[in-house]
Image (cartoon, coloured by chain):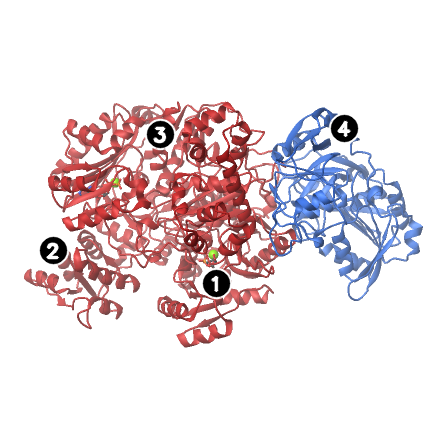
Amino acid sequence: MPLRDDLRTVLLIGSGPIVIGQACEFDYSGTQAAKVLRRQGLRVVLVNSNPATIMTDPEFADATYIEPITPEVVAGIIERERPDALLPTLGGQTALNVTTALHRLGVLDRFEVELIGADVEAIERAENRGRFKQVMEDAGLAVPRAGYARSAAEARRIAAELGYPLMIRPSYILGGGGTGIAANPDEFNDLVDRGLTTSPIGEVLVEESVAGWKEFELEVMRDRADNAVIVCSIENLDPMGVHTGDSITVAPIQTLSDREYQEMRTEGIEVLRAIGVETGGSNVQFAVDPASGRRVVIEMNPRVSRSSALASKATGFPIAKIAALLAVGYTLDEIPNDITGATPASFEPALDYVVVKVPRFDFAKFPNVPNVLGTSMRSVGEAMAIGRTFPEALQKALRSLENGRFGLNADPGEVAATGLSDEDLWRAIGLPTPARIFQVGEALRRGQSVDAVAAQSAIDPWFISEIDGIVKLREELEAGVPTRITLKAAKRAGFSDRQLGYLWGLTDEEVRSRRLQEGVITTFKTVDTCAAEFAAQTPYLYGTYEEEDEVPPADRPRVVVLGSGPNRIGQGIEFDYCCVHAAFALAEAGYETVMVNCNPETVSTDYDTSQRLYFEPLTTEDVLAVVAAEKPEAVIVQLGGQTPLNLARPLEAAGVRIAGTTPASIEMAEDRRQFSALCRRLGLNLPPHDVASSAAEAEEVVDRVGLPVLVRPSFVLGGRKMRVIYSYDELASYLHDLYGDPAEAETTKGPLLIDRFLEAAIEVDVDAIFDGAELLVGGIMEHVEEAGVHSGDSACVTPPPTLSEAASKQIVLATEELARALEVRGLINIQFAVKGDEVFVLEANPRASRTVPFISKATGVPLAKLAARVMMGATIEDLRGEGILPPAGSGFVSVKEAVLPWDRFPEEDTVLGPEMRSTGEVMGIASDVGVAYAKALLAAGHVLPSEGTVFMSLADRDKPVGLAAAQAFAILGFKLVATPGTARFLSHHAIEAEVVDKVGEGPDDAPSRIEAGRVQLVINTPRGGRARSDGRLIRRAAHRHGVPCVTTVQGALAVARSLRSGPAATLRPQSLQEWQSST
Amino acid sequence: MKAGGLLVTAEGDAFAGVSVGAEGMAVGEVVFNTTMTGYQEVISDPSYAGQLVVMTMPHIGNYGVAEADMQSPAPAAAGLLVRSLTNSPTGWRSEGSYGEFLAAHGLVTLAEIDTRRLTRYIRSKGAMPAAMGSDLSESDLREAAAAAPPMTGLDLASVVSTKEPYRVEAVGERRGLVAAIDLGIKRDILAHLTRLGLEVVVLPSSASSEQILSLEPDGLFLSNGPGDPEPLHEASNALRGVLGKVPVFGICLGHQVLGLALGARTFKLPFGHHGGNHPVRRLGDGRVEITSQNHGFAVDLWSLASSNRPASSGSLASADMLPERVETDFGPVEPTHQNLNDGSLEGLRCLEVPAYSVQYHPEAAPGPHEASALFDRFLELMEV
Ligand SMILES: Nc1ncnc2c1ncn2[C@@H]1O[C@H](COP(=O)(O)OP(=O)(O)O)[C@@H](O)[C@H]1O
Ligand SMILES: Nc1ncnc2c1ncn2[C@@H]1O[C@H](COP(=O)(O)OP(=O)(O)O)[C@@H](O)[C@H]1O
Ligand SMILES: [Mg+2]
Ligand SMILES: [Mg+2]
């Protein structure tokens, strides 16, 4: 069954901003789908509010809507574009939910849009847990026993029937939010109470807990002819009870016999049939009782997922691409396997290597959140590694995480586990945390048996025994010396040079040169879907230590692009976007591009993106091995964020040519002392500042600089541990915190930077390219929130709406001077603070910034592509001549808004500050700021009221601007209520506001009003002291009850402005292609 | 320290590892298997007689050994090559360590082999004789490998076949009697037959048609097995005497013997099909099955066709790579299944006599449980 001939236009829905549980994997899937559908001659219409995606680059679709993904907006797009079909399975839960809503609203029927990939019935059957269980039982498949409850009493009755432990899930909650396992009635009542209130329909599912069982996943594909294949089988090292997204996972399955595996395989396919997934990929999860082999189906997702991205990268089988082809008519046997070119996609990949995925967490940014892992996913990213064996892959994955570890212990970071007492260590092993894997290693080193550790951790003994192998080898190595035999054994078990150096008291370089002398050299093997049964056409490689190397010869000059590693807060998809652009641009310019990255979610790790893909950790050692194999002209470190930038120096020291801006210049910009001297020389303004290296020195500096101050430990991206300090008391407790915290020793080793905090300053971001002679300003972005809110967390607008001509000029001049002085070749990002016409430089980053994709969309100028060429020696003039530098300029306004992960961290205060905590961003485009901002807010998930009551509680310093906002709300007809001080201030300025009780001082305080549904919008800016914790209660109440909460006055003002344009304005979608051609 | 181990091929190329199984030397044809589970089923499958098996899955032995997984009483392969052998098994089904099992059964086994290099080698040079062992010199091994006979022309089925007939009871209600010619039969095939209520009399490979017919069976089954089908004249002659009188079902080597009995020729594939992921199209309804495979030879249906094999079109295997229908002494024969990786024949049926066969393994063990309906079909043909 070839391509259907009745389809012309297909609508693809993306997944919107990056949030925990939904990240760049959907850019990978959407991009694949858009590409392949267009290649089939179909017209592709695409909606996604996330500007940092490759899929929303205008050349990937015929009409690209960077618009909020709400049913109303998508309905508008459908009305304009009249697609024949909607493919909802590639944009995560977001796309599925919007699709279901569009169906309910009758939009799909009205405009005769056919759902392809999955129909509403199938989505319902899979998504509604009650129906899912019924369908499974009808198909003869076992599921955990369970019952639904709408009251606590009902829940207790079910509990009595099933017995403890129990899993509780609120109904209709996204991504495991509010779920948990109760071991006893106390925990149970707690979870049930919370669940009943958080569930929008006041219902919880009480389910037999199978925590501790083995957890497995199958990635299944099925076509309309009922052909089905298992693309990949995945085993979770962490047992049931830890969300798969937070588990260390291994592919393929290691601990099931053929019989058990094949039965699971048959059931996996049966699940798709029963649910009615006619075409496409689904993820099916199973739990298996290790004692009896009893197996139950846990859930299935009738769409591509993060696991399917992992499976695609783990096997070389591009699930999303194939799913798209199946949706438009093909069957699996009609689609060739890209990698072999000669065999069909109707087969099951055979792996001759082991893949390990390790999640990355950012708990340090959310100090109030316990780091125990559970059934609700909280990791922000992941690294994947490929090795010939599990120990090798595990150690590679651990060093890929970039959190200061170099493998499974045998590194300086092992003190965290070696420092524990035997009892503490043993207890720790019983508790799933990000540190557990290292603790397991340490317990084995202390002589605990494999079986005991397996029993205590509920991790399968096979994994424990393989880890024990690592530990035993470590002991042998420690007792020995570097020889060809020991080096080879160590490298084959995945030990990094750093670990070996640690064991032998040598530097990395010494280990490395010794190793090369002994001829222990990385060999690269191909990921080929077929365990070498057929020849592979695509060079998708991983490093290991074997007898044969498979790097194919090359006939063109090569450029290595270093990716950005696992996603984390502060470094995510934006950097991957830049790397992908570099790969595209340099390939066009005749280079063979070589990508190195270890993040399985990304477009950069699609074997289609560059000519060669090395799925490897981003450490000096691993990158040098790739460089030795490829002998590139240069290595690009500017585009992947801090990760590759940190490698610039060591790579250069090893004789590697770094493309563009030199490591010395990078260092000059990053080092506060050097940078400050540079600015002084150039006559540029910096906020008063100094550097301290001890607590005592810090106080002196503050005396000199003057309060308030902004303090930050150096060399950290995303503003970790960065704080605004208003008093000496605050300073003292911060310093104690910082220097008293041994776990942070690594980051506080560098100097502490202290700047005068500029109050009420406008923050401005600039992205530019410099080629040595000419400066190309990509764009100037004015932040909505004032300086003090991290640039990654604040909204921004381009072109800048309020910046004076004079300030703009100064900013461009300063950018050029800095670029010239830093000898930038490629990108530079500078953040400024503007007070009136006075411009201060906050920082300069001679690299791609988070805003490059946004600004590229806003202006139509592909900055990362141009930058890659400039780094390789082209001039801006050359690029203009080639016609790849379109004239900049936009007749529209673009707003970027940040998206924060509060729903995953209910314990955390929602206030914004200089430490970045957002996970993603959205873009709103319109012809005026108000509408663009309103679109951005809507896209970020803030549903603003059009009438009702606004609650205000402002810090003194915020009151003047707050007044303007209050006036605006009053004019819009909102009723105002305020805390006593704020109300007094407003009435003083002739604005009426009802006074509410202070928190806890009356029955009618703000939290109670919010809970009672009497407040529709909260404006609460933080203050120190008691007000701060009051504010916290208010913000938490707002958050719990889904009342939008604005924590800055600038934000409040912008909200008021956007409300002025009325809700209808956000419903006028227009494609990026239309916007860009209207200029 | 484990003893060093070495494999040397007939062409003189060496692959180093460590010896983890029995001492001594093993000689045979070196082939690779890409299945990711079922190492024990593989090694005990009599079809691997005379072969040194490379498992491409790096970790082998993870879930130990279980008697229920054995396909014959003992390992049948001549030797085993793996990347990493696990000696501390996991799982409720495990009855012991795989390494100890291999040593106890005297199977020469090498670990720490660059199995991917070896697989690529076999893929590009073809399956060839090799010798392996621990603490043996490279030159000794090379000599042994060079002296080893090639697989082509080898009758190994008669070596592994039962010498005496034996009877296996039906499970549940007995519905009929099947005579099975044992060319190296797997236990799971017997299990499939008996689970259908069939009593099975297993006969040696030398069984004649008279012997078969004297049992008055409801059907004749031809089993899988090792080696080249061409020398199996006894079995194909016996079959010719039975065709048309009793419904016939053949699997793997049994399929090849049916092909020979029908007058077709067989040929050696460059490196065979050994794994659990091969797509096979059912030519009747176009559906694709993911199959378990283990064979080095294939039936050439073109040898019976009046036209020549056309040049292949397109990049993927297509149905026109097989003749639509061929004429034989037993009437017309149709291809029923096709391998989608290389277009080769995976199944056939006679249109005028009740006989059909498949090249792959519907009994799985190891492999996907997708094709077991082929056994039901046998029951239907027998009309029992
Ligand atoms: N009945 C159960 N008992 C114990 N743990 C469970 C149970 N059901 C699910 N889990 C755990 O919770 C995690 C999330 O549940 P799942 O049903 O997969 O929801 P989702 O992936 O949609 O968040 C699973 O990965 C598993 O570890
Ligand atoms: N002197 C200052 N006065 C006011 N705000 C500042 C000052 N310096 C930095 N900030 C704020 O802190 C945020 C983070 O600081 P920045 O130096 O950009 O760190 P990062 O490297 O994390 O991006 C900035 O976006 C800005 O809002
Ligand atoms: Mg799940
Ligand atoms: Mg910054």
Quote the CA–CA distance across marks 1 and 3.
50 Å
Hue of chain B? blue
Which of pointers 4 and 2 indicates the residue nearer the eye? Answer: 4
Name which residue type carries label 4. Answer: Ala
Quote the CA–CA distance across marks 3 and 2.
46 Å
Is residue B298 visible to the viewer in this orientation of the structure? Answer: yes
Earlier sequence position, callout 3 versus callout 2: 3
**Image mark for residue A956:** 2
Residue beneath the point at 29% across and 59% down: A943
Chain letter for mark 1, please. Answer: A
Q: Position of residue A1053 (x, y in %)?
A: 18, 54
* A824 to the left or right of A630: left
Q: Which residue is mark 1?
A: A124
**Image mark for residue B144:** 4
Name which residue type carries label 2. Answer: Asp
Chain coloured red here = A
Q: Position of residue A456 (x, y in %)?
A: 49, 56
Disc 3 is placed on an element classified as helix
Which of pointers 1 and 2 indicates the residue nearer the eye? Answer: 2
Within-10-Å neighbours for mark 3: few <14, some 14–19, many 20+: many
Name which residue type carries label 3. Answer: Ala
Chain letter for mark 4, please. Answer: B
Quote the CA–CA distance across marks 1 and 2.
51 Å
Q: Are marks 3 and 2 on the same chain?
A: yes
